[in-house]
């Protein structure tokens, strides 16, 4: 199946495994790429450039297909070092997400990487296009992880973005199977990015009990946290997530919440 | 184009003009039916059975195609009288929405009407099927008007409902053109119901200035009101809507809000 996205990224199917904090490692990314999609190694999984480098080299032993790297800008200062690292390794495809990618653009372009930026709103998609992005991933309200603050469903965002932009639009959020992929293509997207669906694969390192939990979850079992911090994160509705919401209602700061959100402490 | 929905309702295209408070009148409904979709006269537009009856008879002078009636259950006591009225008139297609339709089922079935119930969640779709509905309209988070309280996007609801139910599923919410209709059919829907799109037609009685306002609006220009009342209504983000939100934050009751929501008073 051919779209401008498959041509751009040199893959067989317009299917991307999105950045996955803690889970976007070589085994998963290489398996996706080897099967004809595009797998991404998530830089945020690693503490040092040496670790990231080892993972990229490991992926290359698993497949000869392209494997990209996802960098979440602004989460840690090391992300800029990680960019240098992947430039040196000759990684051909970079996905950026999170904050303004402006300070990354020169290096990305100098090293001739294909660059896709992930955005939760059409106005940011325009900005990415203006900065020279080769494609954008547009993330809807449905998405797990970071759906943005605007609460606009994917259908609305993709219809608008694909009409207004000249670069290919990739749809993300609630895509779970071939039918939802066809729907996204009908809206005008030229590819789809999936997160949760890939978390549930055999190649994903998530604990089997958590996979089981996610598979049992219904459409009512997610909740949005970090809204009061002007972030937004769709998570499983756990005791912990409910605790975060309660603390947010009382005006908690990110400093007060991060040990819970980060998973280092558990509330019972 | 054939689906189980077009067969059931005897229409050419799987396109329904949804119930529209104040606007679902004979001119619009007959135009939609005449063009091959299904138009609905909205009972809630009228104060008396005589008025509703006159409108239905007027529609029959405008088209020989089927025109249905939408009844929003529980909004007013007269709705049950309206049901008697449309039974007497031999209306062939009824759409119910709002509250539990149980007390309406006997009459609907006795008069051999095709019955479609409108629901904002999959569990209510099951209930409607169990009560004998011939089809359901599933309304997603994207919808103008009444998207329910669950904040689940249409893609998720329709994928699930169309797998679980044996009766046809009709998708509503954010459908605006042929592309979004194709997307809904890809998810497993067998038809689409549109509201706002039909509000903008020549045949709709909405004031031209309001039509212009809606056409200029972006994806950021709607807001949800009546959440604190455990209802939910997606409306244009006006000064009035912002005022309702502010009053809700202060704990206002429906009695205190209804004169603003109903449009009888204006805040400046």
Image: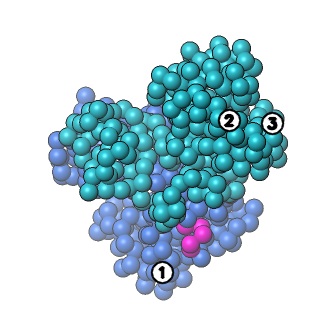
Chain colours: A cyan, B blue
Q: Can see residue B41?
A: no
Quadrant of the frame with the N terminus of chain B: bottom right
**Mark 1 near mark 3, Cβ–Cβ under 8 Å?**
no
**Residue A133 shown in magenta:** no
In the rendered image, residue B218, in percent from the top left (x then y), is placed at: 50, 32
Q: Residue at x 65, y 35 (%)?
A: A54
Relative side of A3 to B232, left or right: right
> Few, some or many C-alpha atoms within 10 Å of disc 2 (few <14, some 14-19, many ≥20)?
many
- For the residue pair A50 and A79, the one nearer the viewer reads as A50
- For the residue pair B25 and A62, the one nearer the viewer reads as A62
Circle 1 sits in a helix, a strand or a loop, which is it? Answer: helix
Question: Is disc 3 on the same chain as disc 1?
Answer: no
**In terms of sequence position, does the residue under pointer 3 or pointer 2 come before the other?**
3
- The residue indicated by pointer 1 is B130
Q: Residue at x 74, y 66 (%)?
A: B2
Magenta segment boundaries in residue numbering: B161-165
Q: Can see residue A150?
A: yes
Circle 3 sits in a helix, a strand or a loop, which is it? Answer: loop
The chain holding disc 2 is A
- The residue indicated by pointer 2 is A56
Circle 2 sits in a helix, a strand or a loop, which is it? Answer: helix
């Amino acid at each position: 199946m051919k779209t401008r996205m498959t041509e751009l990224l040199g893959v067989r199917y317009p299917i991307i495994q999105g950045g996955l904090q803690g889970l976007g490692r070589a085994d998963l990314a290489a398996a996706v790429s080897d099967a004809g999609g595009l797998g991404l190694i998530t830089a945020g999984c690693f503490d040092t450039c040496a670790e990231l480098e080892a993972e990229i080299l490991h992926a290359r032993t698993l497949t000869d297909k392209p494997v990209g790297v996802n960098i979440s800008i602004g989460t840690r200062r090391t992300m800029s070092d990680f960019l240098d690292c992947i430039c040196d390794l000759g990684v051909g495809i970079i996905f950026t997400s999170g904050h303004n990618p402006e300070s990354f653009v020169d290096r990305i372009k100098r090293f001739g990487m294909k660059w896709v930026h992930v955005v939760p709103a059409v106005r940011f998609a325009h900005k990415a296009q203006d900065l020279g992005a080769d494609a954008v991933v547009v993330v809807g309200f449905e998405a797990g992880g970071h759906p943005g603050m605007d609460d606009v469903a994917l259908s609305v965002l993709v219809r608008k973005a694909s009409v207004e932009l000249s670069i290919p639009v990739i749809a993300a959020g609630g895509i779970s199977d071939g039918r939802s992929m066809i729907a996204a293509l009908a809206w005008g997207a030229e590819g789809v990015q999936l997160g949760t669906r890939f978390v549930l694969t055999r190649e994903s390192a998530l604990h089997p009990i958590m996979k089981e939990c996610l598979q049992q979850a219904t459409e009512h079992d997610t909740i949005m946290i970090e809204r009061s911090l002007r972030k937004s994160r769709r998570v499983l509705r756990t005791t912990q997530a409910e605790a975060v919401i309660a603390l947010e209602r009382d005006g908690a700061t990110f400093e007060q919440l991060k040990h819970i959100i980060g998973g280092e402490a558990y509330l019972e």
